[in-house]
Image (tube, rainbow, N blue to C red):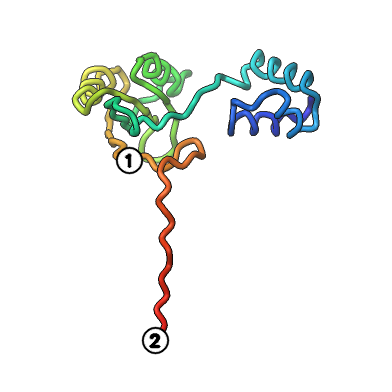
């Protein structure tokens, strides 16, 4: 399949679609879809599958933080070595190279504010070549991965005629 973009978009929006459903949406046969998905997984274009969970609706206590990290880049390696060292920690969910006032964005989760603060102060900030951090705690999630977490009930408009 030359144009696998449509298949990737469908899987990204709902990875629970069956091969038959994907076939109907792409015009391919279920066997072609199965073979293409396998090839995309083997080639590393599909990195994994996951459910998006609204943890705020469970009894699990968790804190998510976005951390801005300033780094001194290394000759010949840029930011890669520091980013690799950071993403090895279990607490780290995501690491992004950024443009602008800071170099890396690190997304982490912990059980409490204290646990996140400990990670930043004891692990992240002490890494050689990390020159500064700024931590932002996520207070409420409205939308993630194109999914809305909390829809407000539609307010009925009231018209008053005099």
Give the answer, above or below, for where 21 lies relative to 89.
below
Choose between 151 and 52: the one closer to the eye: 151
Residue marked by disc 1: 140
**Residue 117 percent coordinates (x, y):** 21, 26
Q: Residue at x 46, y 29 (%)?
A: 52
Sooner in the amino-acid sequence: mark 1 or mark 2: 1
Q: Residue at x 49, y 35 (%)?
A: 145
Residue count near mark 1 (Cα–Cα under 10 Å), binned few <14, some 14–19, many ≥20: few
Task: Classify residue 97 by image quadrant.
Answer: top left
**Residue 138 percent coordinates (x, y):** 31, 37
Q: Residue at x 19, y 25 (%)?
A: 114
Secondary structure of residue under mark 1: loop
Residue count near mark 2 (Cα–Cα under 10 Å), binned few <14, some 14–19, many ≥20: few
Left or right, 39 with respect to 81, comes to right
Task: Judge depth for marks 1 and 2 and give the one in front.
Answer: 2
Task: Classify residue 38 by image quadrant.
Answer: top right
Give the answer, above or below, for where 91 lies relative to 58.
above
Left or right, 74 with respect to 15, comes to left
Give the answer, above or below, for where 39 lies relative to 61.
above
Q: In what quadrant of the picture does the N terminus appear?
A: top right
**Residue 132 percent coordinates (x, y):** 27, 30
- Residue 162, which numbered label? 2
Secondary structure of residue under mark 2: loop
Q: Residue at x 71, y 29 (%)?
A: 22
Give the answer, above or below, for where 35 lies relative to 63.
above
Q: Are marks 1 and 2 in contact (CB under 8 Å)?
A: no
Q: In what quadrant of the picture does the C terminus appear?
A: bottom left
């Amino acid at each position: 399949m030359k144009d696998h973009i449509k298949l990737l978009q469908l899987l990204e929006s709902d990875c629970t679609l069956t091969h038959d459903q994907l076939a109907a949406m792409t015009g391919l046969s279920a066997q072609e879809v199965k073979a293409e998905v396998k090839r995309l997984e083997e080639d590393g274009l599909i990195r994994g599958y996951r459910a998006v969970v609204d943890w705020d609706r469970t009894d699990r206590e968790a804190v998510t933080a976005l951390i801005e990290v300033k780094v001194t880049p290394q000759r010949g390696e840029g930011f890669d070595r520091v980013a690799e060292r950071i993403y090895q920690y279990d607490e780290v969910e995501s690491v992004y190279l950024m443009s602008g006032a800071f170099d890396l964005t690190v997304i982490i989760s912990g059980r409490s504010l204290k646990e996140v603060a400990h990670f930043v102060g004891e692990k992240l900030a002490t890494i050689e070549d990390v020159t500064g951090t700024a931590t932002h705690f996520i207070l409420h999630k409205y939308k993630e991965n194109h999914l809305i977490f909390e829809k407000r009930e539609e307010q009925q408009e009231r018209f008053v005629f005099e």
